[in-house]
Image: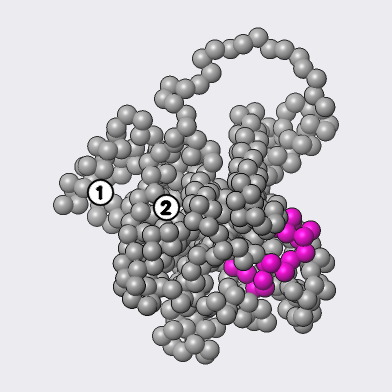
């Protein structure tokens, strides 16, 4: 049976127009569809009644796209069986369906064909198939070790408060959710994500470390594992690590200063807890979706800063979303070169190819345009304030999962827009365009004469 299914899968993937990006995108769609059908079952709801199509679809999309936005509270709406289904979708969405599929092929000692390696490379954001299977194996092993360690540490924190069985399950669920940057929690509507643990630095620290490790990317893991010295790391790994450290530090200092006296966020906490919660806010904005205080209480200037961090997100080939850290760094390098009147974009003695710089600008402008257009449409439809709605839209598009409290009040039409944004954010704007918008055989077949125009 497994052999027949594999042969049919290969035949389907070999159909004309089925490029690697399209297969990767459709695999996420298949997981969402299956998850929706499972969550529709009455046994998945705590009250024994079906949650309804919209709630099930929204939850399945949010879990598979590792976002964290939800129409219904995960603890009170879903039964233990439903929570297991959500956790499985988070894991599949974080690692990618094809990554898990490769693990099964390896386990059963099946050959991994070139077409499957291409899909794996597309799923992980890699530009070539060289060493992709080894990378996947190491990524899976690292995932098991890190999530297992996180589960043990979080269980140690939760068991004294919730009991052995419940605390252990909470530890496993939160470890997977944090590492996959999903943001789903089991603290209930009264818990406000991780607000109950605003004065528990060990809980926030464990979640934060898992979020950062999950957001670095599997390629960076592999490079660190193989080289183990900064000077031997690839330029990409150095860019990821440097940009990640800079964003965490900059966000930490900003939120500490901007929200120190705000009673709706950090103002009522002890000084030590203010420092820890400001650090956690800086980390969780990078597509994690956990919150240690209500996001609706942030000052407007802080909300704008949150939008910037959510747009950037994590790193390529990771469980995180956003335009990615290296993309932001390339944009900054291009800006520096433009201000200095240089045509070449350079970083650490290396020239960034013009095609990649063009892709960085295309991706960023597309994400910003899509975010603003959708936010303006939702603002007109919902009749609410623009900034909180924009916060919701960027949170979905960046697969962050943070909300100022609007998610549960959205109309069905607005929910469908958020669903589409979460899907596009997880698949990736450029990957989505490669999968469905670029015709076969496309490219620049005609070259036109150049001309000089006035800029600025």
Please report the residue visible at 41 percent of the width from the left and 25 percent of the height from the top.
Answer: 440
Answer left or right for 258 relative to 212.
Answer: right
> Measured along the vertical axis of the image, is residue 20 above or below residue 314?
above
The foreground one among 329 and 278 is: 278
Callout 2 crowding tier (Cα within 10 Å): few <14, some 14–19, many ≥20: many
Please report the residue visible at 49 percent of the width from the left and 72 percent of the height from the top.
Answer: 73
Query: In the rendered image, is residue 247 in sight?
Result: no
> Measured along the vertical axis of the image, is residue 431 above or below residue 34?
above
The residue at the far top in this view is 449
The foreground one among 229 and 150 is: 150
The foreground one among 193 and 44 is: 44
Give the x, y percent position of residue 246.
73, 55
Give the x, y percent position of residue 416.
49, 52
User: Do callouts 1 and 2 mark residues in contact (Cβ within 8 Å)?
Assistant: no
- Secondary structure of the residue carrying tag 2 is loop
Give the x, y percent position of residue 153.
52, 78
Marker disc for residue 95: none
Marker disc for residue 96: 2
In the rendered image, which quarter contains the C terminus? top right
Determine if the magenta segment contains residue 303: yes
Query: In the rendered image, is residue 199 in sight?
Result: yes
- Secondary structure of the residue carrying tag 1 is loop
Please report the residue visible at 29 percent of the width from the left and 34 percent of the height from the top.
Answer: 14
Q: Quadrant of the rendered structure where residue 327 is?
A: top right
Of the residues under marks 1 and 2, which one precedes in the sequence? 2
Span shown in magenta: 290-306
Answer left or right for 50 relative to 369.
Answer: left
Please report the residue visible at 51 percent of the width from the left and 68 percent of the height from the top.
Answer: 184
Mark 1, mark 2: which one is toward the viewer?
A: 2
Determine if the magenta segment contains residue 292: yes
The residue labelled by disc 1 is: 110
Callout 1 crowding tier (Cα within 10 Å): few <14, some 14–19, many ≥20: few
């Amino acid at each position: 049976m497994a052999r027949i299914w594999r042969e049919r899968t290969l035949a389907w993937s070999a159909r004309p127009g089925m490029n690697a990006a399209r297969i990767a995108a459709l695999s996420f769609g298949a997981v969402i569809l299956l998850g929706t059908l499972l969550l529709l079952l009455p046994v998945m709801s705590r009250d024994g009644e079906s949650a309804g199509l919209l709630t099930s679809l929204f939850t399945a999309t949010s879990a598979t796209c590792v976002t964290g936005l939800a129409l219904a509270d995960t603890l009170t709406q879903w039964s233990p069986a439903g929570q297991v289904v959500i956790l499985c979708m988070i894991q599949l969405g974080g690692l990618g369906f094809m990554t898990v599929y490769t693990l099964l092929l390896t386990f059963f000692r099946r050959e991994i064909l070139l077409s499957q390696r291409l899909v794996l490379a597309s799923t992980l954001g890699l530009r070539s198939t060289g060493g992709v299977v080894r990378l996947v194996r190491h990524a899976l092993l690292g995932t098991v070790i890190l999530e297992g360690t996180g589960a043990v540490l979080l269980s140690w924190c939760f068991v004294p408060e919730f009991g052995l069985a419940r605390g252990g399950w909470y530890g496993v669920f939160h470890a997977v959710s944090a590492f996959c940057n999903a943001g789903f929690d089991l603290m209930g509507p009264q818990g406000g994500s991780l607000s109950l643990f605003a004065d528990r630095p060990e809980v926030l620290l464990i979640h934060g470390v898992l979020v950062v490790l999950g957001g670095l990317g599997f390629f960076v893991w592999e490079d660190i594992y193989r080289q183990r010295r900064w000077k031997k790391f690839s330029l990409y790994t150095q860019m990821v690590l440097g940009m990640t450290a800079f964003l965490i530090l900059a966000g930490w200092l900003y939120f500490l200063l901007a929200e120190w006296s705000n009673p709706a966020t950090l103002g009522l906490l002890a000084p030590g807890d203010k420092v820890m919660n400001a650090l956690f806010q800086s980390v969780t904005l990078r597509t994690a979706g956990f919150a240690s205080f209500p996001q609706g209480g942030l000052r407007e200037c802080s909300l704008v800063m949150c939008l910037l961090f959510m747009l950037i997100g994590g790193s390529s080939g990771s469980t995180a979303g956003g335009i990615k850290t290296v993309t932001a760094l390339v944009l900054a390098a291009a800006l520096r070169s433009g201000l200095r009147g240089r045509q070449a974009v350079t970083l650490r003695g290396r020239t960034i190819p013009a095609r990649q710089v063009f892709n960085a600008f295309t991706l960023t402008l597309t994400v910003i345009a899509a975010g603003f257009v959708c936010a303006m449409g939702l603002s007109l439809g919902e009749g609410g304030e623009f900034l909180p709605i924009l916060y919701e839209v960027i949170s979905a598009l960046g697969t962050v999962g943070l909300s100022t409290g609007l998610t549960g009040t959205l109309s069905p039409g607005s929910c469908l827009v958020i669903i589409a944004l979460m899907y596009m954010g997880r698949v990736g704007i450029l990957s989505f365009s490669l999968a469905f918008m670029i015709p076969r055989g496309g490219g620049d077949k005609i070259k036109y004469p150049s001309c000089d125009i006035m800029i600025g």
